Image (cartoon, rainbow, N blue to C red):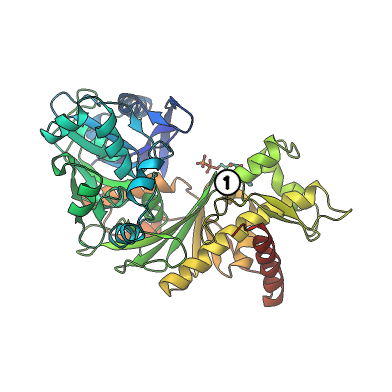
Amino acid sequence: MREHIVAFDQGTTSSRTLLINRQGEVVDVAQRPIEQHFPHPGWVEHDPQEILATQLSTFTDILVRNGLSPHDIDSIGITNQRETTVVWDRHTGEPVCNAIVWQCRRTAPIIEELCGDPEVRERITATTGLVPDAYFSASKVKWILDNVPGARERAEAGDLLFGTIDCWLVWCLTNGAVHATDLTNASRTMLFDIHSCAWDPWLLDLFGVPASMLPEVRPSSGSYGATAHPGIAGNIPICGVAGDQQAALFGQCCFAAGEAKNTYGTGCFLLMNTGEKAVRSRNGLVTTIAASAPGSQRVEYALEGSVFMAGALIQWLKDELGIIESASDVEALATSVSDTAGVYVVPAFTGLGAPYWDADARGAIYGLTRGAGRAHIARACLDALAYQVNDLIDGMVADAGIPIKTLAVDGGASRNGYLMQFQAGLSQLEILRPANTETTAMGAAYLSGLATGFWGSVDEIRAMREVDARFAGAMTPAEREAYLKGWHDCIKRTRTS
Ligand code: ADP
């Protein structure tokens, strides 16, 4: 009996391999950082060979440390930083240049040039569920073909392949046998029609991407071949693939419409499963494909929204204001006072995101009086995280017409009990914090283990989940209204348009 599943969690700053047992527990984790390349201001690159090498070496670490052989592994699930783009030669396996990372802004002028027309923007959003941006893969592929000498000719001759990081890893691990990506990653390329689930010829034409470069698109849970790379022997099946946020949604057991998760990391990522319906947002959220359990004939969708400044605001308290020594100190400081004394922090450091979309707005502190001190400001910062998430929740519920009853949480700042309690009250829902917070890796493992029969059903997976803490809303309607009125007044004063 093969008693373990392996999850590859290829993130923006590191590659990790997690060993997971039948009970859904993380037995061991190996991690290696990956180098960030900043060749020009605003540019961000990764070396695809380093990504592969660190993924392989962390896998070897796990086997050696646990006395396992590849034959002890049921299968591998892969989750990855999304949108990051690799183009490589199908004959030699050599990338034509470094991977262009999702954060990289070099292709903003391409988006401005190609997507300025409101009709084009509308067609892109209607087809892909996305708001046109340099963030997604489409303009990154175009940049590579237009700027790497000879790349366009080689692509047109059928010699080059495109893939996001999952696809690159699958191709390398199978020794070039499988060129495939999954639905969730495809839905972040801005080249994919999320309704017909096919690459869109009009978008390929707009961004000048030859169809011969594109991977086959498969369900997130199912076969992606088996390992055949010399660095990873043993023919281990690869049976789960999903982009990090969709993997986390699955790992948080949000399998049904109306189930939602929020990750409180440097930024926040809120995703809500909307079932078979691809909901078009009127509040500046994006529509994306969710990972589904195997056997489901239908595609499932999610609404996604993000907050730019979440844990980063707590880092700012530490690094710029110096009023706390570590992020975990903020809770004790914030709860050393009984309220914020009317102080509000609007963390529009890089503008206001959904649902306001005001790029020129800047951060502000309001309501300062002679008695306001560092504890009030710290508390107002934690409240600001909750207000921003609440704005996204309100938008999602309005868009989808489905209430959110329970919010599953993870990420560094979800450890903050004060914040969780305030969020539960403000958003009038129950917050569930799982004991196992490796939700992204768990999502990839579940997808793989469901495909191989390692786990029998999503119900079996739900039953394995252990809850660390639940937070129920303890706020009267009048209190809630007063808090929200104060926040929205401050937003009004901060907006530039
Ligand atoms: P990421 O994956 O985005 O790097 P993590 O999930 O590791 O982020 O979370 C780190 C973030 O969480 C940091 O920005 C930090 O400021 C914040 N953080 C960590 N602990 C706490 C805490 N107890 N209260 C509030 N914020 C916290």
Residue situated in front as seen by the camera: 204 or 273 = 204
Label 1 Cα crowd, 10 Å radius (few <14 / some 14-19 / many 20+): some
Q: Residue furthest left?
A: 157
Q: In the picture provided, is 346 more to the left or to the right than 225?
A: right
Element assignment for label 1: loop
Quadrant of the rendered structure where residue 231 is?
Answer: top left
Residue drawn at x 26%, y 29% is: 69
Q: Position of residue 245 (x, y in %)?
A: 40, 50
Residue situated in front as seen by the camera: 378 or 19 = 378
Q: Position of residue 227 (x, y in %)?
A: 19, 33
Residue situated in front as seen by the camera: 400 or 143 = 143
Residue situated in front as seen by the camera: 82 or 240 = 82
Q: Position of residue 39 (x, y in %)?
A: 43, 24
Residue drawn at x 38%, y 29% is: 46
Q: Is residue 95 visible?
A: yes
User: Which corner quadrant holds the N terminus?
Assistant: top left
Residue drawn at x 57%, y 54% is: 352
Q: Is residue 206 above or below residue 58?
A: below
The amino acid at mark 1 is Thr
Q: Is residue 159 above or below residue 123?
A: above
The quadrant where ligand 1 appears is top right
From the image, tell me which residue sits under label 1: 350
Q: Position of residue 301 (x, y in %)?
A: 32, 62
Q: Is residue 459 visible?
A: no
